Amino acid sequence: MIYTVTFNPSLDYIVTVPHFTCGKVNRTSEEKLFPGGKGINVSIVLKNLGVESTALGFFAGFTGEKLKSLMEEKGIRADFISVAEGMTRINVKLRSGEETEINGQGPAIGEGDIKKLYEKLDELSEGDVLVLAGSIPDVMPKTIYMDIMGHLQEKKLHIAVDATKDLLVNVLQYHPLLIKPNNHELGEIFGVELSKKAEVVPYAKKLQDMGARNVLVSMAGEGAVLVAEDGSVYEAEAPKGKVVNSVGAGDSMVAGFLAGYLESRDYEKAFYTGLCTGSASAFSEELATRDEVELLFNQYKR
């Protein structure tokens, strides 16, 4: 079973206002509401690809109840922990020529809530896949990724991590199955600028030397690079298409890689499935569907 963890999930309220003006009454021309958060995005895309998962995380208040109902509508199992204080955050994405975001804070997660999360994680079994993705709320310890992986290291799980800076570097000692920085995040770790795929490879190998098994580096329209644990390196341009919405594309790449890897245990197929899944989400208003991914995968010239 695959489990995803989203520490601070959200309701993403996307509104289009043709000519937004500060200080005036503005009216929307379109409104959409989606469950949000990196781990939740991974679970949604996995479901779209025909792979079941369980989404773990925290929820609170009436917004949390709405989040749960949206997950149920999508047929995704959500085993969320109820937090007594605060409410699940609402992230407003305002589209008016360009996109502006206003992100909420989220509930007041306490030590008791974190303890309940560990109790759920203790139920995982050898061979299960755990996805840790996204930022950490201010009310939680910044070492939580590392703490969780240290706590679970005897279980022989396959863990994928999509995080930045120290959150990512500190977990490498526990040999995650997959990490997925983008080229800017990878460069930030080592204090360099990386814009070409050839430049990415030696730094991805450095993360591998530090403990990562597979390093998948997303590069937006430039494509992606995979440095795999069997020594192989894959580089590819992104499929051609019109970018409609880049939000969730990186999460989709993680989901596609895991789906491809678990089906075939073949790193090349996992790499191209991840690349096409990320692109399919970028080319769509919503997250990638199986048909969209298969269309790109079959048309893609390798």
Image: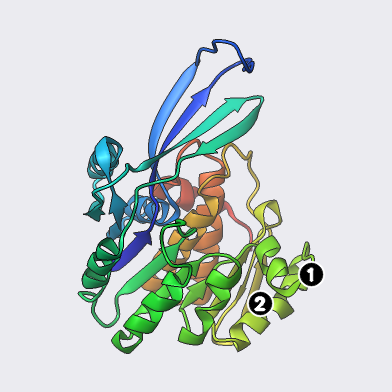
The x, y position of residue 10, in whole percent, is 39, 44
183 on left or right of 26: right
In front of the other: 89 or 20: 89
Of marks 2 and 1, the one in the foreground: 1
Instruction: Residue 256: name its quadrant.
Output: bottom left
Q: Are marks 2 and 1 in contact (CB under 8 Å)?
A: no
| The N terminus: image quadrant | bottom left
**At numbered mark 1, what does the secondary structure look like: helix, strand or loop?**
loop
**At numbered mark 2, what does the secondary structure look like: helix, strand or loop?**
helix
Q: Is residue 207 in view from this perspective?
A: yes
Query: Distance of mark 2 from mark 1, alpha carbons?
Result: 13 Å
In front of the other: 113 or 154: 113
Q: Is residue 298 in view from this perspective?
A: no
| The C terminus: image quadrant | bottom right
Q: Residues within 10 Å of mark 1 (few under 14, many from 20)?
A: few
> Mark 2 = which residue?
204
Instruction: Residue 39: name its quadrant.
Output: bottom left
Instruction: Residue 191: name its quadrant.
Output: bottom right
In front of the other: 247 or 239: 247
Image mark count: 2
The x, y position of residue 12, in whole percent, is 43, 37
> Mark 1 = which residue?
192
The x, y position of residue 224, in whole percent, is 64, 63
Q: As displayed, is residue 18 above or below residue 116? A: above
Q: Residue at x 68, y 71 (%)?
A: 189
172 on left or right of 238: left
Q: Residue at x 58, y 72 (%)?
A: 166
The residue type indicated by label 1 comes to Val
The residue type indicated by label 2 comes to Ala
Q: As displayed, is residue 150 above or below residue 106? A: below
